[in-house]
Amino acid sequence: MAAEKDILYTLEIYAEAYCAKDLSRLMQLFDVDEDISVIGTGADELCSGREQIEDLFKRNFAEATAEKFEWHWTKITICGNTGVVATTLTIHLDINEEKLQVPLRWTVALRQRDGDWFWLHRHASSAADSQNEGTAYPTN
């Protein structure tokens, strides 16, 4: 249970740093190796390595200010010194003084190193609104 709490704590640090637009603190969550990646919701948001990930966050920060992360369903799997957290969340944003709530699905892969958990990969997606509930594929 302690490992699960530590992994969940990384999500809270991410949310705090993201809302504060604190790039340095945000990047401290990621493993020190260059073999890290982020997939965002945008078609061009496929990033690997620290430089590309930092550029993505800088773009996000320039376009909007996140005010709050609201966590929902969460599932954590741990196997040795690796872990995966799958979660749903709503990010509350301010875009040019317009309030927006963005529902997302996230998967984060982590590695434990010297007792701390570090992110190797984060994938974000939006649920397909063209897919009817109870169906396997978006057909609308």
Image: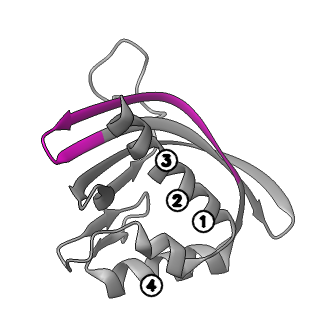
Residue 14 disc label: 2
At mark 4, the secondary structure is helix
Which span is picked out in magenta?
Answer: 68-84
Q: Earlier in the sequence, mark 4 or mark 2?
A: 2
Mark positioned earlier in the residue sequence (3 or 2): 3
Q: Which residue is mark 4?
A: 55
Give how far across and how far down residue 68 sits, in percent: 71, 51
Q: CA distance from mark 1 to mark 4?
A: 14 Å
Q: Nearer the viewer, mark 3 or mark 2?
A: 3
Check residue 82 for magenta coloring: yes
**Distance from label 2 to label 1 (Cα)?**
6 Å
Tag 2: amino acid = Tyr
Give coordinates of residue 122: x percent, y percent.
Answer: 34, 56
Which residue position holds label 3? 9
- Would residue 6 be found to the left or right of residue 33 on screen? right
Q: Quadrant of residue 77?
A: top left
